[in-house]
């Protein structure tokens, strides 16, 4: 699999611009391009998916463990002609206090992939050679294959930069001028997601492709990608075992070929307010025997027919609080589903949606808690252990996750908390009540597939209970 890792000396250098532009430019050549993102970020993969027509997938060595990076990559890249991995932060930046763990450099080494360094050259000339030399020599196991210069001011500026890098023996694989017309708007948690600006995002991706096509040597980049050696690992699979349950009708034994199939419906929140999800979650639920159906809490006034499980992931409910609140029929449906004991898995935005209120606007009222925006950014990796048995995790289950929000919820934990954090701080967080598991913590279920299977089993049990109750009615 030809592959490249797009990295930078620091955040804000233009990794997303270059990586997304490369993906789109190669896709326009008719190549099947597999898009990946190092780290936990949900937003950039949305732009990657728009550029390639394939799901953007994350490679996070902290949440999933280094041993899963290459298998997850191989799973996502199967059948493709090229894979492009966008890095996170600076090339050697990773989990705080953990050395190289979860850094772009670690991902590149695990994938045995050449690195292209995107350098913001707007305020330097010959010094660029010293900068690049430092990054190339810091870890000899990271293979820096070339540089793409971003925000170059003029022809003269480009000549000076090229001369300096030629002295350093580092190939220049592209030069991009300042192009504010393709800038992507940001807000308090990063770029505005694709789902909120689809038409504008399409135009921006097309402009990025044009900019990269005009400024980069795509043939040289493809040649570099082909230097990546084979990976000696099996692709990750969402289906390592038989389904978590066997669907069957009343009075029929498991495995009976005559039994009607009844896959439990698991409704997953989507739309502009709930854009944060990992593709592997839906794959794991499907492999566990569930039917995954997406709904939009901004537009849909009822849960999908037959909903037996509810997954409400992350996103920006604070931006859409008035609209979410105005959809009273759906709020009532969610509240009734949770009150009846239906399994609900809610992360971050989902936690806020289940609260009594968000910035004073009524929400679903499932939790006796109120949420609001704050000035403080909560950001970082967490090590967690499940405190209470829930539809998602058995008490004692250990997971690594990520927090990323500018909201607070009061109280921060219920009488039965969801998680106990063991690092970097010790505290309890989240809510477990009836079938609800709600927390700020974002998790990647590929690291612990049992949580998806457990949730699918809870949904299947609800489907069976509803069916049996209907059959018992006169």
Image (spheres, helix red, strand yellow):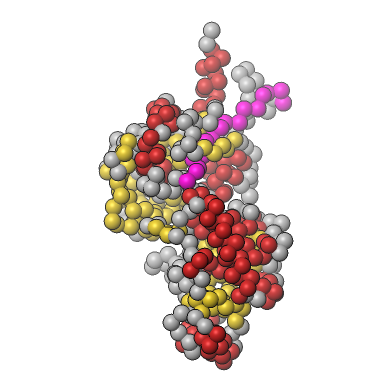
Q: Is residue 182 above or below residue 115?
A: above
Residue at the top extreme?
474
Front in this rendered view, residue 334 or 252: 334
Q: Is residue 271 magenta?
A: yes
Percent of width and height locating residue 447: 52, 52
* Residue 248 quadrant: top right
Is 235 located above or below residue 147 in the figure? above
Say which of 303 and 191 sits in front: 191
Say whether residue 371 is magenta. no
Q: Nearer the viewer, residue 390 or 410?
A: 410
Q: Residue furthest front?
A: 181
Instruction: Say whether residue 157 is visible.
Output: yes
Task: Answer above or below: position of 336 versus 317.
Answer: above
Instruction: From the top left corner, tell me how far across and down residue 182 is, in percent.
Output: 52, 65
Please report the residue visible at 53 percent of the width from the left and 88 percent of the height from the top: 156
**Which residue is at 61% across, 83% downward?**
171
Callout count:
0
Residue 233: x and y in percent read 65, 60
Q: Is residue 471 left or right of residue 225?
A: left
> Where residue 366 appears, x then y in whole percent?
36, 33
Give the magenta range: 257-272
Tell me what residue is drawn at x 70 percent, y 74 percent.
219
Q: Main secondary structure of the magenta part?
A: loop
Closest to the observer, 407 or 101: 407
On screen, residue 354 above or below 421: above
């Amino acid at each position: 699999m030809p592959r490249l890792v797009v990295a930078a000396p620091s955040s804000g250098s233009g990794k997303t611009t270059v990586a997304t532009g490369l993906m789109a430019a190669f896709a326009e050549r008719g190549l099947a391009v597999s898009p990946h993102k190092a780290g936990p970020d949900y937003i950039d993969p949305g732009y990657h998916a728009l550029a390639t027509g394939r799901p953007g997938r994350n490679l996070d060595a902290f949440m999933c463990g280094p041993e899963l990076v290459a298998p997850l990559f191989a799973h996502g890249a199967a059948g493709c002609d090229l894979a492009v991995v966008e890095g996170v932060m600076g090339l050697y930046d990773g989990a705080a206090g953990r050395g190289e763990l979860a850094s772009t450099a670690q991902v590149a080494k695990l994938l045995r992939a050449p690195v292209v360094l995107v350098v913001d050259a707007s305020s330097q000339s010959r010094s660029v050679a010293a900068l690049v030399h430092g990054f190339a020599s810091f870890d000899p196991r990271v293979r820096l294959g070339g540089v793409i210069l971003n925000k170059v001011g003029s022809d003269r500026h480009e000549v000076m930069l090229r001369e300096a890098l030629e002295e350093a023996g580092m190939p220049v694989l592209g030069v991009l001028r300042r192009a504010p017309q393709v800038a992507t708007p940001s807000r308090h948690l990063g770029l505005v997601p694709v789902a909120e600006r689809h038409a504008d995002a399409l135009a921006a991706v097309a402009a990025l492709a044009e900019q990269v096509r005009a400024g980069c040597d795509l043939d040289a980049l493809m040649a570099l990608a082909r230097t990546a050696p084979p990976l000696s690992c099996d692709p990750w699979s969402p289906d390592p075992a038989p389904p978590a349950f066997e669907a069957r009708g009343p009075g029929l034994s498991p495995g009976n070929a005559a039994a009607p199939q009844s896959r439990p419906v698991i409704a997953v929140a989507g739309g502009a307010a709930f854009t944060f999800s990992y593709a592997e979650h839906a794959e794991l639920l499907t492999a566990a025997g569930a039917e995954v159906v997406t709904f939009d809490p901004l537009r849909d006034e009822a849960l999908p027919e037959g909903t037996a499980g509810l997954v409400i992931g992350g996103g920006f409910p604070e931006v859409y609080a008035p609209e979410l609140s105005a959809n009273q029929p759906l709020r009532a449906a969610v509240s009734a589903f949770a009150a009846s004991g239906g399994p609900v898995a809610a992360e971050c935005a989902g936690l806020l949606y289940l609260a009594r209120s968000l910035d004073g606007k009524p929400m679903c009222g499932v939790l006796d808690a109120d949420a609001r925006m704050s000035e403080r950014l909560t950001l970082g990796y967490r090590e967690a252990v499940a405190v209470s048995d829930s539809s998602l995790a058995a008490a004692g289950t250990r997971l690594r996750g990520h927090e990323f929000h500018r909201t607070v919820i009061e109280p921060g934990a219920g009488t039965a908390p969801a998680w106990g954090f063991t690092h970097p701080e010790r505290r309890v967080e989240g809510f477990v009540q009836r079938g609800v598991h709600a927390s700020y913590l974002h998790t990647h279920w590929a690291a612990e597939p049992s949580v998806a299977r457990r949730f699918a089993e809870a949904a299947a049990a609800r489907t069976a209970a509803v069916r049996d109750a209907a059959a018992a009615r006169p």
